[in-house]
Amino acid sequence: MSSPPPPPSGKGRPRGSGGFAWRAFFHHSTTPVFVLGKSRRLRYANPAWEVLTGVKLAEALGMVCSQRRHSTPLAAALAPTPESLAGRPDRARRPAPPGRNGPPWWDVTFAPLAGADSLFGIVGFVAVVGEPVPAAARKIPPGVASLRDRRTAHFSTELLAGESLASTRLVAQVRLAAGMFAPVWIVGEPGSGKETVARVIHHTSALRDRAFVGIDCTGLQPYLIESLLFGHGGLGVSDRVGTVYLKEPGAMPRDLQQRLADHFTEHAGTRLVCGSERAAPDSVAAGGLVPVFQTALSVFELRVPPLRDRLDDIPRIATRLLNRAIDPAALAVLRVHTWPSNLRELAEVLYESAAASATGAILREHLPHELRVKAGLTRTPSPKSLNLDAILEAVEKRVIQLALKKANNNQTEAAELLGVFRTKLWRRLDVLGIPAPPQPKPRKTDDKE
């Protein structure tokens, strides 16, 4: 029987091997080489591998290379195939991990090392396939190019222009933001058009040829946001994305906020724009936002004025939204309302009125009854009258009060109980003279992670 091989000497070669230093042998190779142990943990990688992946061996040593759901893109690209784990040489084509150096595809060859009883380890070799193509050099289909040009034409500063001083100031700020690459923090009330402003900044900047990605941080689960940005082929590291817009980033867990902050402060290829009801310093002071969002990711603060400060712009906005004729008397009614839900509420009223007017011009008779009452065009009947409108309004007032009481003064829940939009409930509270109830304070959470 042959004697067993001598144990390793600790210097990269077996004892009695005559001085062959396998680490130095791989170290000088220009082919990216890595070695996995039998548990699929990374045990060695040469400098060519470090250059290709952009990762130092000291940082990746011990990484488990698998394609499980929680594996990193790099670990998934280096994961051995079932054939190689069974002891047979194999090769697999894998997408290059996002954010790494090199072309978009890797051909990974796995050479298993058989032990006395089982697999001892695997030696892997990486060959790059193709050359990276910059986003600007990729050929865009004519249909996509046409759609992009239409979107760019739509989201111009003309979309925000108006007669009021507030609109003039807003357009000047947007043009200034579009001319720089600094992160932008947009402050505005709900429904004031913060995302529209972000899109105008994107489509009037040098990044207009790349995609705009909007993420509602209050409407998506944190793991979905993380997967969307940093998962396999994530948008956060794609050279096709020009601007990422985060709506209310303070709604995300603080650990995810920190990861986003680290990413956007280190990667200059994608611009970050955030929209919130509160300024970044206020959100940091309240404990909902990590400080780096104030110091590094809100370099340029831009405030979107509420619609009540832009009442002179309503004729222009209404015509732009509907592309239909609106009677001057109807516009006069629209300018009387205070619009607590801003542009979102105006758009809802206009679309309802357009449906009521069929294909003709929108007259004041097509506007909601409560707006006409507030403008003094429809007389509110006496409570003692048998007029049906007065009776219905009294009943409606009582039902709304009961719904608010049942919902613990939460207007969103009350609107759901009544089966109406929240903006319509706000209008009815205003018209019926019901004082807006105080909103319940959010419960504090203990953030110890």
Image (cartoon, grey):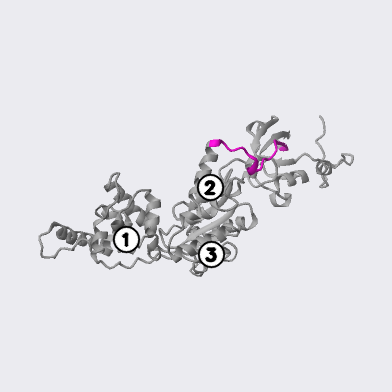
Residue at numbered disc 3 = 301
Q: Which mark is residue 411?
A: 1
Q: From the viewer's side, name the closer residue of 16 and 203.
A: 203
Q: Amino acid at mark 3?
A: Glu
Residue 384 location in percent, x, y?
10, 65
Q: How far apart are the two marked residues, 1 and 3, measured between alpha carbons?
A: 30 Å
Compared to residue 24, the image places residue 263 above or below, namely below
Front tag of 1 and 3:
3
| Neighbourhood count class around disc 3 (C-alpha, 10 Å): few under 14, some 14–19, many 20 upward | some
Residue 426 location in percent, x, y?
30, 61
For mark 1, give the secondary structure: helix
| Neighbourhood count class around disc 2 (C-alpha, 10 Å): few under 14, some 14–19, many 20 upward | some
For mark 3, give the secondary structure: strand
| Neighbourhood count class around disc 1 (C-alpha, 10 Å): few under 14, some 14–19, many 20 upward | many
Q: Which residues are magenta?
A: 121-142
| Residue 137 drawn in magenta | yes
For mark 2, give the secondary structure: helix
Left of 375 or right of it: where is 107? right
| Residue 358 drawn in magenta | no
Residue at numbered disc 2 = 228
Count of numbered tags: 3
Left of 375 or right of it: where is 444? right
Q: Amino acid at mark 1?
A: Gln
